[in-house]
Image: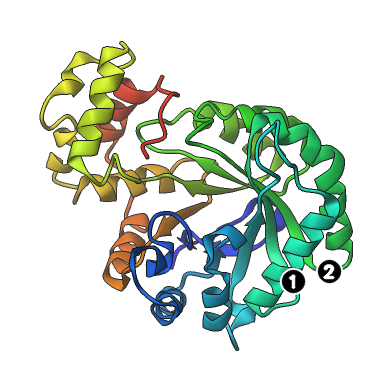
Amino acid sequence: MQTVRLGRTGLEVSAAGLGCGGHSRLGTGTGHDENHAVRIVQRAMDLGINFIDTARVYGTEPAVGKAIRGRRDQVVISTKVGPGFGADGVLLTPEGLTENLEKSLRALGTDYVDVYHLHGVRPAQYRHCVEFLVPEMRRQQGAGKIRFLGATETFIRDPQHRLFQQALPDDHFDVIMVGFSMLNPSARERVFAQTLEKDVGTLIMFAVRRALSRPEALRELLAGLVDEGVVDASLSSDDPLGFVAAHPDVESLVQAAYRFCRHEPGAHVILSGTGNVAHLEANVAHIQAPKLPDEVADQLEALFGSVDSVSGN
């Protein structure tokens, strides 16, 4: 397994990370039981994945806890708590954060988490996070229950990365989770330029999602961008990205999507969610494949380099 240094945390982590949320939630989102989820986590570890990302809201912390029993020292655990329910709704208190952290620790069967994130922070919630929640995270860090502080964006609602354009200059977070893909590479300038300067670790989400795994979803998304005048009209064809997989050094569009993210300067852990062991194994192989051919990467940049309005979900 290829490994990377997760920014200033100094943690040596697998370039492929197991995401325990998304549609599949280790299979529990598609009808499988917790034992199935445990087996997927264990297989990921056997493949060399040592970065596991979960959250209380995913419902997969107990499965992760069972899978890592007796192997806690082999893994880096990332989990999360949401800061609230919108700018005008109920926001998480410091006491609520600590209560959620304790529940996560019990579910995971550990006395600390390596990275604890504020999850899906909306730009309007950021000041509340800084004023009330980050200080509590620091207190829990001092107590040894959190090693490093993190934050994740709501990429579907915030594909322009407005949160991190606010947050990164303040430098409260050691690790961030950011959306990045060949369809919306805007994090290159708006996020990675700052994380590289500040040595912040990055977790990459939305490398594939619906648009790059389902041809009909891709056609629909690109047709909308063509109608808006954001991308070239040639992308309204039946096989708009056929040139990618047609290259002799590219196996598939999904493989290309993972390779695109893996070799981007500033991208550290490429997260992949799954409910199927064979799918997990394929994704790990995709993430570890070489950099995309220059001619493919250049054409993708020409087509999507200015796109910042879609998540691909």
SS for tag 1? loop
Which residue is found at the position 51% from the left and 32% from the top?
A: 157
What's the amino acid at mark 2?
Gly
Q: 116 or 5: nearer the eye?
A: 116
Disc 1 designates what residue?
112
Q: Looking at the rendering, in which quadrant would you find the C terminus?
A: top left
Q: 97 or 41: nearer the eye?
A: 97
Position of 142 with respect to 77 (left or right) is right
> What is the x, y in percent for residue 30?
33, 64
Residue 291 shows in the view: no
What's the amino acid at mark 1?
Tyr
**Picture quadrant where residue 263 is located:** top left
SS for tag 2? loop
Q: Is residue 110 above or below residue 221?
A: below
Q: Residues within 10 Å of mark 1 (few under 14, many from 20)?
A: many
Of callouts 1 and 2, the N-terminal one: 1
**Picture quadrant where residue 289 is located:** bottom left
Q: Mark 1–mark 2 contact, CB under 8 Å? A: yes
Which residue is found at the position 19% from the left and 51% from the top?
A: 251
Disc 2 designates what residue?
144
Which residue is found at the position 52% from the left and 68% from the top?
A: 60
Position of 155 with respect to 95 (left or right) is left
> Extreme bottom residue here?
70
